[in-house]
Image (spheres, rainbow, N blue to C red):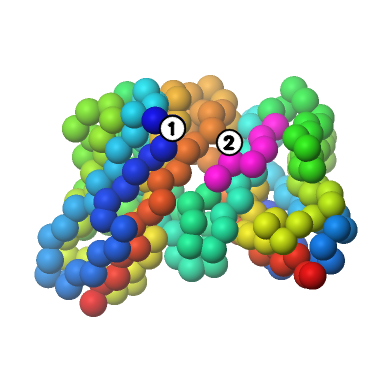
Amino acid sequence: GENVEQHPSTLSVQEGDSAVIKCTYSDSASNYFPWYKQELGKRPQLIIDIRSNVGEKKDQRIAVTLNKTAKHFSLHITETQPEDSAVYFCAASTMGRDDKIIFGKGTRLHILP
Amino acid sequence: DTEVTQTPKHLVMGMTNKKSLKCEQHMGHRAMYWYKQKAKKPPELMFVYSYEKLSINESVPSRFSPECPNSSLLNLHLHALQPEDSALYLCASSHTGTGGNEQFFGPGTRLTVL
């Protein structure tokens, strides 16, 4: 089955700097890659997703890149702000198969003042 | 309505109790999910209902029993739980049962088993 590895487990960046979180997946059939943000005590919320027919997607300060050959995908947050502090989960899924999404173990992002 | 709601927010139960968790969505989604989340861990899939039929059971112990009375409601019946079952239980929903769709999560029920 699918396995998603996520690094780093903890990341501290200075406010205003960029943050990058990286994930790898094992199942070449995976073709949908969502990223969820979970603030302390809150529900996970989708912040961006990418499908395998696209190499990059941007939404304001957030971007995701996908390298299908290497089975890597990454989340980039620019101009980080205090409200970006949260746990971020990458995930992988296969459209047209079932509804399982396999989560990475999460990255705790701290934005330092 | 673009939210998934869950009740109760908190639940404390003994190992001999029977209780139920409830989840509701009015977004017309036809796939609904139960996840278990332990502290500092990702959500762990338990069950998936697609078009009101159980489509995935991730080998969950029978002390957890899901039910989908209609397309808007999802229940999780709990019986004879163990202390290690204490966790945040998240419900989610998505458009269809074919994957590749955003899952919308509810706020969760924080369960403590004594």
Which residue is pictured at 81% across the width and 30% down the height? A55
Q: Quadrant of residue B50?
A: top left
Q: Nearer the viewer, mark 2 or mark 1?
A: 1
Q: Where does the magenta region start and end?
A: A45-50
**Where is B11 relative to A61, above or below?**
below
Say which mark, if any, is on residue B54: none
- In screen coordinates, is A29 left or right of B27? right
Residue with the mark numbered 2: A93
Residue with the mark numbered 1: B2
Q: Secondary structure at mark 2?
A: strand
Residue at mark 2 shares a chain with residue at mark 1? no
Q: Position of residue A66 (x, y in %)?
A: 79, 36
Q: Is residue B12 magenta?
A: no
Q: Secondary structure at mark 1?
A: loop
Label 2 resides on the chain identified as: A
Q: Quadrant of residue B80?
A: bottom left
**Where is A45 relative to B14, above or below?**
above
Q: Looking at this rendering, what residue extends furthest in the right direction?
A: A17
Predominant secondary structure, magenta span? strand
Q: Position of residue A73 (x, y in %)?
A: 76, 42
